[in-house]
Image (cartoon, helix red, strand yellow):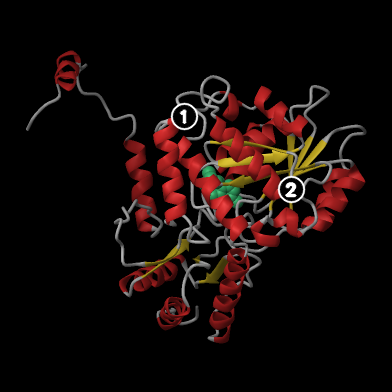
Amino acid sequence: MPTDPAHDAARHTAVPPFADPFAWTADVLRSRRTAGLLRTLTPRPADSALLDLAGNDYLGLSRHPEVTSAAARAARRWGAGAGGSRLVTGTTELHAELEAELAGFCGFEAALVLSSGYAANLAAVTACTADPAGPGLLVSDARNHASLIDGCRLSRARTAVAAHADPEAVAKALAARAPGESALVVTDSVFSVDGDAAPLGALAAVCAEAGAGLLVDDAHGLGVLGEGGRGALCAAGLAGAQGTVATVTLSKALGSQGGAVLGPAHVIAHLVNSARTVIFDTGLAPAAAGAALGALRLLRREPERAARTRAVAAAVHGRLSAAGLDATRPDAAVVAVRAPSARAALAWAAALRAVGVQVGCFRPPSVPDGVSRLRLTARGDLDGAALARAVDAVIATAPSGG
Ligand code: PMP
């Protein structure tokens, strides 16, 4: 076997064998396997024949020729990587162009793109609670995405977790703060597990009444909700509203990779000056920026894509419910179908895969309520026949009692 000289050198200077300090990880994995909760990575072949209802490519844009060509053109023009953080060499004219178009499309004054939606949420939550007068209070929905939760953990603000989609619980948490204490309410617009929407209008009213900021993660709303896919904030009449900041991902409906924060220009400038995932992370790769810009322009030209995706989700839900399955009514593109147990969910997903349909399988610990589900993502680009085949398969392979 050929050996790498660097490894040979390491062997010569190696200390005598000692107990593996990571042996405990094997024990943890063993218990996960026993409980049927072990996760593994399965490479997806480029030419997979599987019908994909598992990903978040809601509009089918990640393989659209206009989007992939825009990515290739951007890489050729600007390089494969951004080459540095945004404040050093990682801001190109392409980044500025994307930010201006994204802000305009979603109805906000300014935007800042980052390497992921995850990084965007960390940046937004921490920067919006970095008031030198005092970090104040964060009120976070109990079912928020992990990236918002991690933002709360990184923030110096005190976090109160409010009951899911409950404006009264939020109002109560805000009322309990000290006089003059600042506050930020954070919520997903569409929750990723069940696909249900947050009561944004009521939350905005509670925030306005209490003088609190509102931060909405619109990862699952952009491209699907609002006029022409302008997002959940547009749908709720909150795009660009005072005291409102949004985050989005470029990796779902826009079919690219990356994330963004949208808000008033002074808040975006504050992020550039203080958010660690802006300052210390390499800028968004040019290909990803080019692809997102291409997708955005496509969406402007073909606004019916968003409504079509919502209609597909409603049709999937209608058929599954009519067949007696416990499917959640979708507020955007995600339809969740409950399974009787983690094992049943896993077996159901495997049976579907065997007949050529790929679906998401959510099991504890990544679901907040311990309920295992299949997660189907409606895709606006699927034709009626493909859709019918997929839904028929979900019904035919359903476990009894599911
Ligand atoms: N927020 C929500 C609600 C999400 O579902 C996701 C992706 N799973 C993210 C943020 C993170 O976005 P990204 O994948 O671009 O890091």
Quadrant position of residue 78: top left
Q: Which mark is residue 107?
A: 2
Identify which amino acid the numbered label 2 is placed on: Gly
**Residue drawn 31% across the image and 67% down it:** 49
State left or right for residue 66 relative to residue 12.
right
Above or below, 179 against 311 in this view is: above
Above or below, 14 against 41 in this view is: above
Q: Position of residue 238 (x, y in %)?
A: 79, 52
For ligand 1, tell me if the residue under mark 1 lies within 8 Å.
Answer: no
Q: Position of residue 201 (x, y in %)?
A: 82, 57
Q: Which mark is residue 82?
A: 1
Instruction: Mark yes or no: residue 6 visible.
Output: yes
Within-10-Å neighbours for mark 2: few <14, some 14–19, many 20+:
many
Q: Which mark is residue 254?
A: none
**Residue drawn 81% across the image and 50% down it:** 170
Q: Nearer the viewer, residue 367 or 192?
A: 192
Within-10-Å neighbours for mark 1: few <14, some 14–19, many 20+:
many
> Number of callouts in the render?
2
Element type where label 2 sits in the image: loop
Q: Nearer the viewer, residue 261 or 130?
A: 261
The residues tagged by marks 1 and 2 sit, at their Cα atoms, a distance apart of 27 Å
State left or right for residue 259 relative to residue 374.
right
**Residue drawn 44% across the image and 68% down it:** 345
Quadrant position of residue 19: top left
Residue farthest toward the left in the current orientation of the protein: 1
**Residue drawn 74% across the image and 59% down it:** 235
